[in-house]
Every structure is written in C-alpha cells, then in structure tokens.
C-alpha cells in the first residue's frame, strides 16, 4: 500500500533535499575544522594550508617587474610593510 504512494517525483524531491542538506552541513563543518587547527605560537594563517611564522614576512601583489608588497606576521596579525621588496634573497618566498 505504501509503495503505491511513492512516485518518481517524491524520490527526486527527497534526493534533492538530501543533497542540499549535505552541502549546508559540510560548509560549517569545514570552517570548524580549520578553526581547530593548531598554529604555532604567534603564527598567521594566510590560507587554508599556508602558515607564516611569527616574525616572518609573506609577499603579495607582485608586479611584472618583480616588485612585491610584503606583510609581516606579528603575534597572529598580518600588517602591511611600507616598502616594496624585489630581491629573492631578501624577500620572502611565501605568498600571502
């Protein structure tokens, strides 16, 4: 008797709701897992997989001539440095 009430439309709606629910649940779960990640003391998280150590720099917005802006990680906070950096031996190789 119950089998007679279930239609293809009902099954499709159930599958769609299950897919949407799994997406909605996975987004906060991913954020929570990233928040649980333990960083070294004073380090800065610049992307999901990239960490800059306390007192180290990272570079961003490099132009075609090779000049890059830099940020300094200080006690978990990134702050932009006022001067551009060019020399690969002196500048950080880590991208912000």
Image: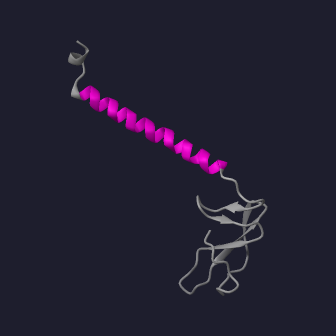
- Expressed as whole percent of the image width and height from the top left, the position of residue 60 reads 61, 73
* 27 is within the stretch colored magenta: yes
The residue nearer to you, when weighing 83 against 20, is 20
Q: Residue furthest left?
A: 4
- Label count reads 0
Q: Residue at x 55, y 47 (%)?
A: 30
Asked whether, in this view, residue 1 is left or right of residue 15, the answer is left
The residue nearer to you, when weighing 57 against 64, is 57
Residue 41 occupies quadrant: bottom right
- Expressed as whole percent of the image width and height from the top left, the position of residue 50 reads 61, 64
Asked whether, in this view, residue 76 is left or right of residue 23, the answer is right
- Expressed as whole percent of the image width and height from the top left, the position of residue 32 reads 61, 45
The secondary structure that most of the magenta stretch takes on is helix
Q: Residue at x 33, y 29 (%)?
A: 14
Residue 46 occupies quadrant: bottom right
Q: Quadrant of the C terminus?
A: bottom right
Q: Where are the magenta residues, as a range?
A: 9-36
Q: Is residue 6 above or below residue 88?
A: above
* 31 is within the stretch colored magenta: yes
Asked whether, in this view, residue 25 is left or right of residue 11, the answer is right
Residue 8 occupies quadrant: top left
């Amino acid at each position: 008797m119950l089998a007679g009430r279930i239609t293809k439309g009902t099954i499709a709606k159930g599958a769609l709701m299950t897919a949407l629910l799994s997406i909605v649940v996975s987004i906060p779960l991913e954020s929570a897992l990233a928040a649980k990640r333990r960083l070294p003391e004073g380090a800065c998280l610049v992307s999901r997989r990239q960490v800059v150590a306390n007192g180290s720099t990272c570079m961003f917005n490099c132009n075609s001539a090779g000049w890059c802006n830099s940020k300094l990680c200080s006690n978990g906070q990134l702050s932009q440095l006022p001067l551009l950096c060019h020399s690969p031996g002196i500048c950080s190789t880590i991208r912000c």
